[in-house]
Amino acid sequence: MASLKGVSANPTKQNHILGEDKIVRVAVKNDNDYIAGPNLIPQRKESGKWKTLNSNSPNPLKPDQKDYDDWGIKEMFDNKKGTYRFKVEVERYDSKGDPVKTEGTFYTDEFYIK
């Protein structure tokens, strides 16, 4: 699982089939002793370059919390076949759940919509 600064995120499967799969499920985890989590930003490979799609999903997680973030293939990826990944900004939060700072960025493994 891709991770940075105690925060992990990765799609739960690599291949998704249009008409069969309705969502891309991303496992997210915080191994820190403070509130932190991944802000997921989808990207699609177009002509060999990564294009950032116009959406994101912050996931503030309590210490040692694991969860899933579901992305509708129709709603979030426009039912387009292709190669995708998530750019992940590692966010640190205060005790109220408000973002304090971005700790860094990493990328998930590629996944495919076929």
Image (spheres, rainbow, N blue to C red):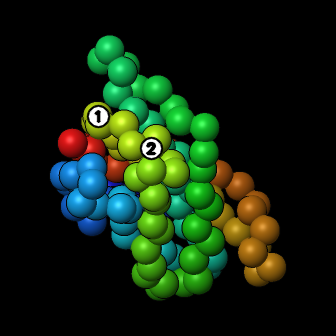
Q: Position of residue 54 (x, y in %)?
A: 60, 37
Check residue 82 in the rendering and tell me which mark sits there, or answer none: 1
On the question of residue 96 being in view, the answer is yes
Q: Is residue 59 left or right of residue 27?
A: right
Q: Residue at x 29, y 36 (%)?
A: 81
* Of the image marks 2 and 1, the number of the one nearer the N terminus: 2
Look at the picture and state if 51 lies above or below 43.
above
Q: Looking at the image, can residue 90 be seen? A: no
Name the amino acid, label 1: Gly
Q: Nearer the viewer, residue 73 or 37?
A: 73
Q: Residue 100: x percent and y percent? A: 76, 61
Marks 2 and 1: CB-CB under 8 Å? yes
Identify the secondary structure beneath mark 2.
helix
- Residue identified by numbered label 2: 77
Residue at left offset 71%, top offset 55%: 101
Quarter of the image for residue 113 reads: top left
